[in-house]
């Protein structure tokens, strides 16, 4: 059975200053990350998926699939506000040869269990045996997806869960109640990888993997090789970095800023997000220099 393994950053999507998709920078970022990680999770929260049109999201997926390392795992976030467009994007991901798709619960309205069950059940029905993950991100979708819904969907062929609850007890419940040879759990953050690994998780989706892929890979390899002390030290270093990201107002905006500061690329988030100001960039540059020197 297909399962996610390793470091799979939720790739940011580069835009130009006028808001149009920056395809040149996108290709560069895909090629840069392809040499350093195990997979890419695209068009998600870091990728501004909710701010793009359906056609733009398809175009991003096509570019990533074309320019990524051939054995790189590609997971496409296909979630939208409605079932019809999510099915369309999921079919597209399948048809162009991506490895899996994933969707948050439909956002804006606060849905009940019966609504969520049918949303995901319809996607599973219309996309066959293509691996599909529930992306559980209650902070962004605006409500929780219950364990009962996940269990019921597992019976219908749901492939797994991307857990972005930021709750280690919730993650432990998923590993105990859901994970098995036929059901996958991936961690949706770098912030608690060491704990999740101890619970049996074998893949994580780190936002900072966009700009510090080598650090995320180091922590993964330390854990997998049994270097508990080293993994914990790297985890603490990564978590300290996460606190610095808010110098640019949010973790997502900081990743665009750090990509420029580290010389990876210069790109913009999509409006209505406002890129880091010169003052924020200066504060972030100084803080990163101190953090890297520690």
Image (cartoon, rainbow, N blue to C red):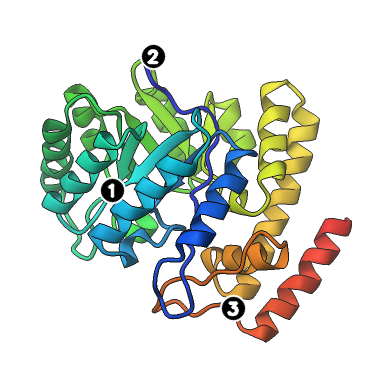
Q: Quadrant of residue 182?
A: top left
At x 38%, y 58%, the residue is 139
Residues at marks 1 and 2 touching, judged by CB atoms closer than 8 Å: no
Q: Which label was assigned to residue 78?
A: 1
Q: Which label was assigned to residue 276?
A: 3
Q: Is residue 191 visible?
A: no
Mark 1 or 2: the one toward you: 1
Q: Quadrant of residue 109?
A: bottom left
Q: CA distance from mark 1 to mark 2?
A: 25 Å
Q: Residues within 10 Å of mark 2 (few under 14, many from 20)?
A: few
Q: Is residue 269 left or right of residue 177?
A: right
Q: Residues within 10 Å of mark 1 (few under 14, many from 20)?
A: many
At x 11%, y 44%, the residue is 114
At x 19%, y 29%, the residue is 152
Residues at marks 3 and 2 touching, judged by CB atoms closer than 8 Å: no
Q: What is the quadrant of the N terminus in the image?
A: top left
Write down the residue under mark 2.
Answer: 181
Q: Residues within 10 Å of mark 3 (few under 14, many from 20)?
A: many
Q: Is residue 117 visible?
A: yes
Q: CA distance from mark 3 to mark 2?
A: 44 Å
What element does badge 2 sit on? loop
**Count of numbered marks:** 3
In the image, is residue 145 above or below residue 277?
above
Q: Is residue 190 left or right of residue 155?
A: right
* Viewer-closest of 81 and 76: 76
* Viewer-closest of 148 and 273: 273
At x 11%, y 38%, the residue is 122
What element does badge 3 sit on? loop
Q: Mark 1 or 2 closer to N-term?
A: 1
Q: Mark 3 or 2 closer to N-term?
A: 2
In the image, is residue 88 above or below residue 225?
below
Q: Position of residue 4 (x, y in %)?
A: 46, 28
């Amino acid at each position: 059975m297909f399962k996610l393994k390793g470091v799979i950053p939720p790739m940011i999507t580069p835009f130009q200053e006028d808001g149009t998709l920056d395809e040149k920078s996108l290709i560069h970022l895909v090629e840069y990350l392809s040499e350093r990680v195990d997979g890419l999770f695209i068009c998600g929260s870091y990728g501004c998926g909710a701010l793009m049109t359906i056609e733009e999201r398809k175009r991003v997926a096509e570019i990533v699939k074309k320019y990524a390392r051939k054995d790189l795992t590609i997971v496409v976030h296909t979630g939208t506000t409605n079932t019809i467009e999510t099915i369309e994007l999921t079919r597209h991901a399948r048809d162009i040869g991506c490895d899996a798709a994933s969707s948050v619960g439909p956002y804006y309205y606060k849905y009940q269990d019966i609504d969520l069950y049918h949303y995901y059940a319809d996607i599973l029905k219309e996309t066959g045996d293509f691996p599909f993950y529930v992306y559980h991100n209650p902070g962004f979708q605006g409500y929780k997806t219950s364990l009962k819904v996940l269990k019921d969907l597992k019976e219908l062929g749901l492939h797994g869960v991307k857990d972005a609850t930021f709750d280690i007890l919730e993650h432990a419940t998923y590993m105990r109640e859901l994970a098995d040879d036929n059901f996958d759990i991936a961690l949706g953050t770098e912030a608690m990888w060491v704990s999740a690994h101890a619970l049996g998780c074998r893949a994580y989706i780190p936002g900072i993997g966009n700009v510090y892929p080598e650090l995320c890979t180091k922590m993964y390899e330390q854990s997998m090789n049994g270097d508990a002390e080293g993994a914990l030290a790297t985890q603490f270093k990564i978590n300290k970095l996460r606190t610095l990201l808010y110098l640019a107002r949010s973790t997502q905006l900081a990743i665009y800023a750090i990509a420029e500061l580290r010389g990876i690329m210069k790109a913009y988030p999509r409006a209505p997000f406002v890129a880091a100001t010169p003052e924020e960039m200066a504060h972030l540059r100084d803080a990163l220099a101190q953090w890297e020197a520690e």
